[in-house]
Image (spheres, helix red, strand yellow):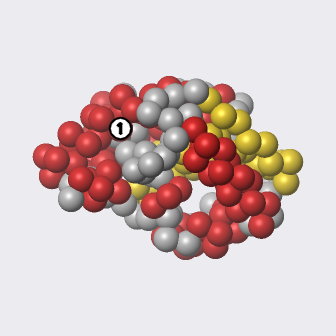
Amino acid sequence: MLYEQFARPSGMAGKLAGLFMNKENERLNEWTLSFLNIERGDRVLEIGFGPGKALQKVVETENVFLYGTDPSEVMVETVLRKLHAKGKAKQVGIINGTARDLEAFSQPLDKVYSVNNLNLWEAPLETLGHLHSLLREGGKIALTLCPHENGANDDTTVVIGGQLRALLVEAGFHEVQVHIKPTKPNDSVCAVGLA
């Protein structure tokens, strides 16, 4: 049940999971976005936006159009409410769905990012291949994970970094770089690639 509330938050427990994710991912969101250099006019996609802190930061960039997908209706409603309150809802296209659902998505993109949810994707290689086809030449993707599994440690993060690099290369990305950041409970990893 606890896993389900982080994978697909629902109800009051889902709202509490969202609050925890906000706190947990705040620094990771900033770190991930720092690799993307989001600029005026960019078309950006966040996969698994959760409570939407990163979306809210990106939408402050002038003339950026932002897409976001999340499988949780609770998170979608929360984010839409926050964006409406800020008058930013027209800049954002929100999709209630999984990463796999993006195979029907066809908008051209400049930047794509995901924080702490790639491990929940049903078919990561296929999804990454599709995202590669949507990114303009030179477009960037950044995938961040902090392992939380039982028995995970900083060595796990290094292994995950290698796996992320391999996935991105196999999906067609190049100049893939893997970055490690000291975090708790374990180090975090961000893999960045170019289309």
Q: Please state the horizontal and vertical placement of residue 186, each as a whole percent of the image.
A: 50, 35
Q: Which residue is mark 1?
A: 21
Give the quadrant of the C terminus.
bottom right
Q: Position of residue 47 (x, y in %)?
A: 51, 53
Q: Is residue 186 visible?
A: yes
Residue 129, compared with residue 176, is above or below; it is below
The residue sitting at the left extreme is 12
- In the rendered structure, the answer to whether residue 5 lies left or right of residue 103 reads left
Residue beneath the point at 86% across and 48% down: 175
Q: Is residue 54 above or below residue 73?
A: above
Most foreground residue, 177 or 34: 177
Q: Quadrant of residue 179?
A: top right
Q: Quadrant of residue 8?
A: bottom left
Residue 23 in the image: state x and y as whole percent. Answer: 36, 28
> In percent of the image, x 44 and y 33: which residue is there?
185
For this rendering, which residue is in front, 117 or 3?
A: 3
> Which residue is pictured at 56% across the width and 34% down the height?
187
Question: Seen in the image, is 177 located left or right of residue 20?
Answer: right
Q: Secondary structure at mark 1?
A: helix
Q: Hey, what amino acid is under mark 1?
A: Met
